Image (cartoon, rainbow, N blue to C red):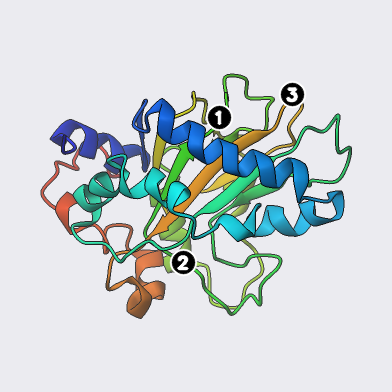
Amino acid sequence: MPLTTEEKATFKQDGVLVRRGLANPEQVKRAVSLIESSYREAMAPDDIPAYSQRTFAPELAEHAELLALYTETGAAAHAADLLGDTSPVTTAQVQIRVPESEFPGVQAEKAMHVDGVSCPHLDPRELRTFSLLVGVVLSDISDPRGGALRYLPGGHLAMARWFADEWSLGMTQQVPPEIDRENGTPFLGRPGDVLLMHHLVPHSVARNLMPFPRVMAYFRVSHPDHAGRRLEALCDPWLDYPPLADVPASNFEE
């Protein structure tokens, strides 16, 4: 079912939309089985810092069962509802917040940031931006202490202003100080829930203080024209979102 005008308005206001149970239990089960095998059998503790910056289970990035969480759940259709048109998504990113009790001090917290901009592990002049982040929940995330992603509702508008007025390519600062001080709203959910989040929404991730891993599959979705206008898209939050142009914005824009 396509996104309603009300859902699009919510996305326009918050930069975030959650669709509960979009991935069915069988789809989740197949993906979790693959990831769990990699996590338990192939991962070494020394791998965790690098995987946390890129992806866990890198050998599964192009696996059909993981890509199906995007292409066969309705998530791809919702991305098109928001962007109008999308470039093909060919890889999945697996992000696991490992239990602090099992791997003490190994996995650092992630401060407030916008993906692909001034990343600590990249040259600050390098941009790896996109339009929309799609996240599929693959483990129970009912407690924010379990390494839940924390996002700032409406932060996409503040970030666009900062990118337009204060930021410049090559800066190592990821967000303005007032956003860096925010704790954010924890994204909580059950396996199969799907998060649609505007690329410009700042977010952070804390350590996992629960006794089991927190597992998400992420897909980075771009408007077909995004790669040629990355800098412009940082300053204009709706450049990649033509279907939202006619969504009433008077109650949402500052």
Mark 3–mark 1 distance (CA, rounded to whole Å)? 15 Å
Look at label 3 and name its amino acid: Met
Is 77 in front, or is 125? Answer: 77
Where does label 1 land, which residue?
Answer: 186
Q: For this view, does 196 lie left or right of residue 93?
A: left
Locate residue 23 relative to residue 128 in the image: left or right. Answer: left
Q: Is residue 17 above or below residue 164?
A: above
| Residue at horizontal 20 percent and vertical 48 percent from the top | 81
Report the mark closest to the observer, 3 or 2: 3
Q: Which residue is mark 3?
A: 210
Q: Residue at x 49, y 37 (%)?
A: 30
Q: Nearer the viewer, residue 138 or 245?
A: 138
Q: Secondary structure at mark 3?
A: loop
Res. 129 mark: 2
Instruction: Determine the secondary structure under disc 1.
Output: strand
Q: Quadrant of residue 193?
A: top left
How far is disc 3 from disc 2 in space, using C-alphas? 31 Å
Q: Secondary structure at mark 2?
A: loop
